[in-house]
Image (cartoon, helix red, strand yellow):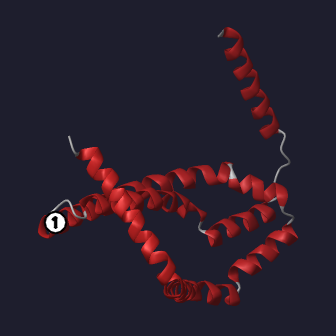
Amino acid sequence: MRKIKHQLALLTLSAACLHAYAAPVSPSKQALVDHVLKLWNIDNIGQSMLQVPVADAVQQARAMLQGRAAPDKRDAAMNDIVGEAKQFMNEATPITRASADKLIPTTIAPMLAERYTEEELKQLIAILESPVKKKFEAMLPEMQKTLGEGVAADTRPVIDPKLQGLKEKIGLRLRAAVTP
Protein backbone atom coordinates (compact mmCIF):
# COMPACT_ATOMS: atom_id res chain seq x y z
CA MET A 1 0.00 0.00 0.00
CA ARG A 2 2.84 2.35 0.88
CA LYS A 3 4.52 1.62 -2.44
CA ILE A 4 1.30 2.44 -4.33
CA LYS A 5 0.95 5.75 -2.46
CA HIS A 6 4.57 6.58 -3.29
CA GLN A 7 4.01 5.76 -6.98
CA LEU A 8 0.84 7.87 -7.05
CA ALA A 9 2.71 10.77 -5.46
CA LEU A 10 5.47 10.48 -8.08
CA LEU A 11 2.93 10.29 -10.89
CA THR A 12 1.11 13.36 -9.58
CA LEU A 13 4.40 15.25 -9.24
CA SER A 14 5.44 14.23 -12.76
CA ALA A 15 2.15 15.43 -14.21
CA ALA A 16 2.46 18.72 -12.34
CA CYS A 17 6.00 19.19 -13.65
CA LEU A 18 4.94 18.48 -17.23
CA HIS A 19 2.10 20.97 -16.92
CA ALA A 20 4.45 23.56 -15.42
CA TYR A 21 6.88 23.18 -18.32
CA ALA A 22 4.24 23.47 -21.02
CA ALA A 23 5.06 26.21 -23.44
CA PRO A 24 3.45 29.48 -22.40
CA VAL A 25 0.63 30.62 -24.64
CA SER A 26 0.85 34.10 -26.09
CA PRO A 27 -2.00 36.46 -25.25
CA SER A 28 -3.02 36.64 -28.92
CA LYS A 29 -3.17 32.85 -29.21
CA GLN A 30 -5.06 32.57 -25.92
CA ALA A 31 -7.58 35.11 -27.22
CA LEU A 32 -8.08 32.94 -30.31
CA VAL A 33 -8.52 29.81 -28.17
CA ASP A 34 -11.04 31.64 -25.99
CA HIS A 35 -12.91 32.77 -29.10
CA VAL A 36 -13.08 29.19 -30.44
CA LEU A 37 -14.40 27.96 -27.10
CA LYS A 38 -17.06 30.68 -27.04
CA LEU A 39 -18.23 29.83 -30.56
CA TRP A 40 -18.18 26.09 -29.88
CA ASN A 41 -20.49 26.19 -26.83
CA ILE A 42 -18.75 23.15 -25.40
CA ASP A 43 -20.06 23.92 -21.92
CA ASN A 44 -23.37 22.36 -23.02
CA ILE A 45 -21.74 18.93 -23.09
CA GLY A 46 -22.99 18.06 -19.62
CA GLN A 47 -26.57 18.81 -20.56
CA SER A 48 -26.20 16.70 -23.69
CA MET A 49 -24.78 13.84 -21.65
CA LEU A 50 -27.71 13.99 -19.23
CA GLN A 51 -30.41 14.10 -21.89
CA VAL A 52 -29.79 10.55 -23.09
CA PRO A 53 -30.21 8.70 -19.77
CA VAL A 54 -33.10 10.95 -18.71
CA ALA A 55 -34.91 10.35 -22.01
CA ASP A 56 -34.21 6.62 -21.68
CA ALA A 57 -35.65 6.58 -18.15
CA VAL A 58 -38.82 8.35 -19.30
CA GLN A 59 -39.15 5.98 -22.25
CA GLN A 60 -38.68 2.94 -20.02
CA ALA A 61 -41.32 4.26 -17.63
CA ARG A 62 -43.70 4.78 -20.53
CA ALA A 63 -43.10 1.22 -21.71
CA MET A 64 -43.59 -0.18 -18.20
CA LEU A 65 -46.90 1.63 -17.79
CA GLN A 66 -48.20 0.66 -21.24
CA GLY A 67 -50.81 -2.06 -20.79
CA ARG A 68 -50.27 -2.19 -17.02
CA ALA A 69 -52.18 0.87 -15.93
CA ALA A 70 -55.53 2.31 -16.84
CA PRO A 71 -55.17 5.12 -19.39
CA ASP A 72 -56.07 7.87 -16.92
CA LYS A 73 -53.60 6.59 -14.31
CA ARG A 74 -50.97 5.98 -16.98
CA ASP A 75 -51.35 9.53 -18.33
CA ALA A 76 -51.23 11.04 -14.85
CA ALA A 77 -48.14 9.01 -13.97
CA MET A 78 -46.42 9.98 -17.22
CA ASN A 79 -47.19 13.65 -16.61
CA ASP A 80 -45.59 13.33 -13.18
CA ILE A 81 -42.59 11.43 -14.57
CA VAL A 82 -42.02 13.96 -17.36
CA GLY A 83 -42.31 16.76 -14.81
CA GLU A 84 -39.74 15.06 -12.58
CA ALA A 85 -37.41 14.59 -15.55
CA LYS A 86 -37.70 18.27 -16.48
CA GLN A 87 -37.08 19.29 -12.88
CA PHE A 88 -34.03 17.03 -12.77
CA MET A 89 -32.66 18.59 -15.96
CA ASN A 90 -33.33 22.11 -14.63
CA GLU A 91 -31.42 21.28 -11.44
CA ALA A 92 -28.60 19.27 -13.01
CA THR A 93 -27.84 21.50 -16.00
CA PRO A 94 -26.33 24.37 -13.97
CA ILE A 95 -24.18 21.86 -12.07
CA THR A 96 -22.79 20.28 -15.25
CA ARG A 97 -22.34 23.69 -16.89
CA ALA A 98 -20.39 24.98 -13.86
CA SER A 99 -18.21 21.87 -13.95
CA ALA A 100 -17.53 22.31 -17.67
CA ASP A 101 -16.78 26.02 -17.18
CA LYS A 102 -14.32 25.07 -14.44
CA LEU A 103 -12.62 22.30 -16.43
CA ILE A 104 -12.48 23.84 -19.93
CA PRO A 105 -9.67 26.31 -19.15
CA THR A 106 -7.45 23.56 -17.72
CA THR A 107 -8.29 20.75 -20.14
CA ILE A 108 -9.68 21.79 -23.52
CA ALA A 109 -8.10 25.24 -23.85
CA PRO A 110 -4.53 23.89 -23.41
CA MET A 111 -5.24 21.15 -25.95
CA LEU A 112 -6.35 23.70 -28.52
CA ALA A 113 -3.40 25.97 -27.77
CA GLU A 114 -0.95 23.07 -28.06
CA ARG A 115 -2.31 21.44 -31.20
CA TYR A 116 -3.29 24.47 -33.30
CA THR A 117 -1.21 27.33 -34.60
CA GLU A 118 -2.59 30.85 -34.48
CA GLU A 119 -3.30 30.65 -38.20
CA GLU A 120 -5.20 27.37 -37.76
CA LEU A 121 -7.21 28.86 -34.90
CA LYS A 122 -8.13 31.79 -37.15
CA GLN A 123 -9.26 29.34 -39.84
CA LEU A 124 -11.28 27.40 -37.27
CA ILE A 125 -12.96 30.61 -36.12
CA ALA A 126 -13.78 31.45 -39.73
CA ILE A 127 -15.42 28.04 -40.10
CA LEU A 128 -17.37 28.36 -36.84
CA GLU A 129 -18.55 31.87 -37.77
CA SER A 130 -19.30 30.99 -41.37
CA PRO A 131 -22.78 32.01 -42.59
CA VAL A 132 -22.82 28.80 -44.64
CA LYS A 133 -22.22 26.73 -41.49
CA LYS A 134 -24.98 28.60 -39.66
CA LYS A 135 -27.35 28.08 -42.59
CA PHE A 136 -26.50 24.37 -42.66
CA GLU A 137 -27.04 24.02 -38.91
CA ALA A 138 -30.37 25.80 -39.20
CA MET A 139 -31.42 23.23 -41.79
CA LEU A 140 -30.38 20.21 -39.71
CA PRO A 141 -33.69 19.72 -37.86
CA GLU A 142 -35.65 19.92 -41.12
CA MET A 143 -33.26 17.56 -42.90
CA GLN A 144 -33.32 15.08 -40.00
CA LYS A 145 -37.12 15.18 -39.86
CA THR A 146 -37.44 14.75 -43.62
CA LEU A 147 -34.98 11.86 -43.69
CA GLY A 148 -36.54 10.26 -40.60
CA GLU A 149 -40.01 10.41 -42.15
CA GLY A 150 -38.67 8.98 -45.41
CA VAL A 151 -36.83 6.13 -43.68
CA ALA A 152 -39.91 5.39 -41.55
CA ALA A 153 -42.17 5.29 -44.62
CA ASP A 154 -39.68 3.23 -46.61
CA THR A 155 -39.01 0.66 -43.88
CA ARG A 156 -42.44 0.53 -42.20
CA PRO A 157 -43.60 -2.69 -43.96
CA VAL A 158 -40.49 -4.53 -42.77
CA ILE A 159 -39.78 -2.83 -39.44
CA ASP A 160 -43.29 -2.51 -37.96
CA PRO A 161 -43.93 -6.27 -37.71
CA LYS A 162 -40.47 -6.78 -36.19
CA LEU A 163 -41.05 -3.92 -33.75
CA GLN A 164 -44.43 -5.35 -32.79
CA GLY A 165 -42.80 -8.74 -32.21
CA LEU A 166 -40.15 -7.13 -30.03
CA LYS A 167 -42.81 -5.33 -27.98
CA GLU A 168 -44.70 -8.59 -27.52
CA LYS A 169 -41.54 -10.39 -26.38
CA ILE A 170 -40.72 -7.59 -23.95
CA GLY A 171 -44.30 -7.64 -22.66
CA LEU A 172 -44.11 -11.40 -22.10
CA ARG A 173 -40.78 -11.04 -20.26
CA LEU A 174 -42.18 -8.24 -18.10
CA ARG A 175 -45.32 -10.24 -17.27
CA ALA A 176 -43.22 -13.27 -16.41
CA ALA A 177 -40.98 -11.16 -14.22
CA VAL A 178 -43.83 -9.59 -12.23
CA THR A 179 -46.09 -12.64 -12.00
CA PRO A 180 -45.56 -14.52 -8.73
The number of callouts visible is 1
Q: Position of residue 125 (x, y in %)?
A: 74, 75
Q: Neighbour class for label 1 at 10 Å: few (<14), some, many (≥20)?
A: few
Identify the image quadrant of residue 33.
bottom right
Residue 90 in sight in this render: no
- Could you tell whether 123 is left or right of 93 in the image? right
Disc 1, SS? helix
Residue 93 locus on image (x, y percent): 43, 58
Q: Is residue 35 left or right of residue 145?
A: right
Q: Is residue 87 left or right of residue 132?
A: left
The residue shown at (67%, 48%) is: 106
Residue at x 53% of width, y 63% of height: 44
Quadrant housing the C terminus = top left
Residue type, mark 1 in image: Ala
**In this view, 136 is above or below 15:** below
With 154 as the anchor, is 132 left or right in this view?
right
Of 169 and 111, nearer the camera is 169
Place of residue 155 in the rendered image (x, y in percent of width and height, measured from the top left): 53, 82
Name the foreground residue: 25 vs 39.
Answer: 39
Write down the residue under mark 1. 76
Name the image quarter holding the N terminus: top right
- Whether residue 127 is situated above or below residue 139 in the rendered picture: above
State the residue at coordinates (59%, 68%): 41
In this rendering, does residue 158 appear at all? yes
Foreground pick, 78 / 162: 162
Q: Residue at x 71, y 85 (%)?
A: 130
Query: Residue lying farthest top?
Result: 2
Which of these two is toward me, 10 or 59? 59
Q: Position of residue 109 (x, y in %)?
A: 71, 56
Q: In the picture, residue 74 is in which quadrant?
A: bottom left
